[in-house]
Image: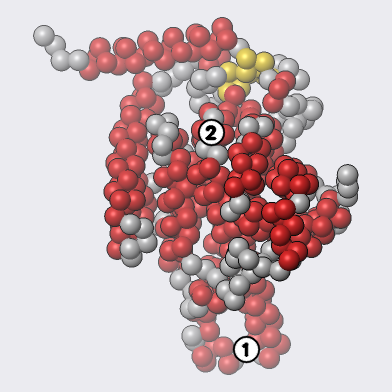
Amino acid sequence: HIKSPHLRGKILEVMSYLIPKGASHGFEHEGGNLSTLFQEHTISTTSLIPTLTQFYIDIEVTGSHNQFYEKHTYRHYMGELLLYVAQFPNYLASIQKESENMEKFTRFVNMMLNDVIYYNGEVLESLAKIRKMEIDRLDTAAWEAQSDEDKERLDKELKDLEGTVSSYIRHSTQILKIMRLLTEKTLAPFLLDDMIQRMAEALNFVLDKIAGKKTMELKVSNPEKLGFKPKDMLSLLSEIYMNLAVSDTFAMAVVKDGRCYNQKTLVKVSNLLSNHALMDVDFIARFNKFVALCKECETEAMELDQQLADIPDEFEDPITCTIMMDPVRLPTSGTCIDRTTAVRHLLGDETDPFNRMRLTIDMLEPQEELKARIHAFVAQRKLDSSTASAPSP
């Protein structure tokens, strides 16, 4: 077994060169003889998928001075390999088996979500800068009045920004394609209480960047040059939303995202899917049904917030300042927080957030007695609310 992240990354890079690519750099079933190793070699068919997911996790920290670049570059090679081999039934079965290792698989997914959020945040910021620079250059007199040195500096800055956008869009699109594949073929891990809210928040974040209030900042003169295709990204995102929407709890998870959820954005996306014929009629009908369900959940969530005003301190998560529905005790600090809050933190950092001591998910201690009291409190508040709103006889 090779332990060096750099050497493992280089092996992935070499393996990615074996992927057959057509004139449009798309995947083909027939390629050079070496590509058949993916289909015929026993070690590859049995070990490649778990190796790829483990590598995605391990490469988070390499110890190298160049680890940021290495991490994103090697993860891109990993993504290319995963998307290619997933077309073959034995690898798809391996992916589904790998998803049964819930802790490892959710850590893998969580890191992909971190990456796609980072990429899209950087893309939005860079596109806004590119747009401003393009607008500034429309003032010909002001541009010509600048020194040659300043022009050269600005040209380089623009070129660097365009390179950043092109690279990050490519990485982001790849991750969304992987998410579409995984949510279609291995849905169960995404519906865990610990993961479904995380998925909803990440998807809402990306959707807000592509179709939210600040979309004018994305209007650059030549988006095709940068590989920026917002319609394609909307199609990908909407498919992932619909893959997850088979769960009754997903719509509520989408609505509970107080930072990026916006009903108007979902309606806008629905209109874009229809007006630009991005998806078929049946899909758009299902998406519209989901949007309507989100509206209902939004009303329900607002009513619940009113019912649960002024909750006892012992029922409140000290990190999110919301009521704990599944409290767990952190044995390293003795603090009680909601399981969802704890897992979200531990998927990216296996330390107690209150004292930085080592802490893993399996060390969390369920607090059943406290949980029962919280649920009884919630039930009573709902009963009191319904009684107060009932019409007098």
Q: Which mark is residue 214?
A: none
The answer to which image quadrant residue 72 occupies is bottom right
Q: Is residue 324 visible in this depiction of the protein?
A: yes
**Rendered image quadrant of residue 50:** top right
Taking the image as drawn, is residue 175 in sight? no
- Picture residue at 65% right of the left edge, 78% below the top: 159
Q: What is the x, y in percent for residue 206?
A: 50, 52
Label 1 sits on residue: 146
State which mark lies toward you, 2 or 1. 2
Placement of the C terminus among the 4 image quadrants? top left
Query: 151 or 16, which lies in front?
Result: 16
Q: Which residue is mark 2?
A: 188
> SS for tag 2?
helix
Secondary structure at numbered mark 1: loop
Q: From the viewer's perspective, is 370 left or right of 350?
A: left
Q: Residue at x 88, y 44 (%)?
A: 1
Residue situated in front as seen by the camera: 108 or 187: 187
Q: Using a 10 Å C-alpha cutoff, classify the residue at mark 1 as few (fewer than 14 neighbours), some (14 to 19) or many (20 or more).
A: few
Which of pointers 2 and 1 lies earlier in the amino acid sequence? 1
**How far across and down, in percent of the image, does residue 15 sit?**
76, 60
Query: In the image, what residue occupies the spot 49% across and 13% down?
Result: 374
Mark 1: amino acid: Gln
CA separation in Å, label 2 and label 1: 59 Å
* Residue 379, horizontal then vertical, whole percent: 39, 12
- Which of the two residues, 171 or 97, is positioned nearer the viewer here? 97
